[in-house]
Image (cartoon, rainbow, N blue to C red):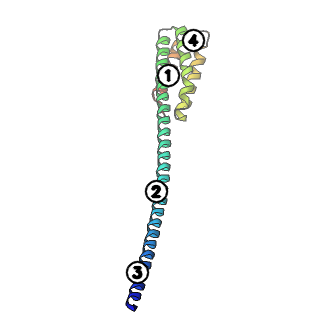
Amino acid sequence: MMFRLKSALIIGLLSALSLTACSEAGDTVKDAADKAKDTAAETTEKVKDTATETAEKAKDTVAETVDKGAGLVALNDMKDSVTSTLDAAKTGDFDTAKTEFAKVQEAWPALKDNIKPDSAQSIQEGIETVKASLGEGEPNKDKIVGELTNLLKSVTGIQLG
């Protein structure tokens, strides 16, 4: 009987140890799962932040590209209008020159903010000079042609920026 009691105690003790080991293993698995969950949440947050930053950078790049495209369109319009004004002035057709020059003045504000300040100043001065010369009662053809030629050089030399 003593042998049976010892056997029962040993079996009981081994069972208790097994249960304790299972419980500790379960806790270890639960801790590992919690850590994995936290790591996954952190990784998801980092990916989300990176995606947001990337999207905002792309948005800014697209906006800059659109602005530059608008600047190029305005620049081409300005060159075409100055050239048309110059062609009309060369023939002495100042009515057409004034009409074409009005297009130069309309194109200028859209272009002005997209170019470097030194280019903007020379163009602004050229526009004012030509405007004054075209507004004279008897416009001086040679003077206006010279001013428009200089303005065309300034417009052609524009650096967008």
Quarter where residue 124 is shown: top right
Mark 1 and mark 4 lie on one chain; the one further toward the N terminus is: 1
**Amino acid type at mark 4:** Pro
**Of 22 and 32, the residue lying toward us:** 22
Quarter where residue 105 is shown: top right
Q: Which percent across, then down, holds residue 61?
A: 47, 38
Residue 62 lies, with reference to residue 90, above or below; the image says below
Residue count near mark 2 (Cα–Cα under 10 Å), binned few <14, some 14–19, many ≥20: few
**Quick one: SS at disc 3?**
helix
Q: Which percent across, then down, holds residue 157?
A: 46, 29
**Amino acid type at mark 1:** Met
Which tag is nearer the camera, tag 2 or tag 1? 2
Whole-number angstrom distance, CA of label 4 to CA of label 3: 116 Å
Mark 4 and mark 3 lie on one chain; the one further toward the N terminus is: 3
The residue shown at (50%, 35%) is: 63
Q: Which percent across, then down, holds residue 100?
A: 52, 14
Which tag is nearer the camera, tag 4 or tag 3? 3
Whole-number angstrom distance, CA of label 2 to CA of label 4: 77 Å
**Of 81 and 8, the residue lying toward us:** 8
Mark 1 and mark 3 lie on one chain; the one further toward the N terminus is: 3
Report the residue marked by disc 3: 14
Report the residue marked by disc 2: 40
Residue count near mark 3 (Cα–Cα under 10 Å), binned few <14, some 14–19, many ≥20: few
**Of 135 and 1, the residue lying toward us:** 1
**Amino acid type at mark 2:** Ala
Which tag is nearer the camera, tag 1 or tag 3? 3
Report the residue marked by disc 4: 139
Whole-number angstrom distance, CA of label 2 to CA of label 3: 38 Å
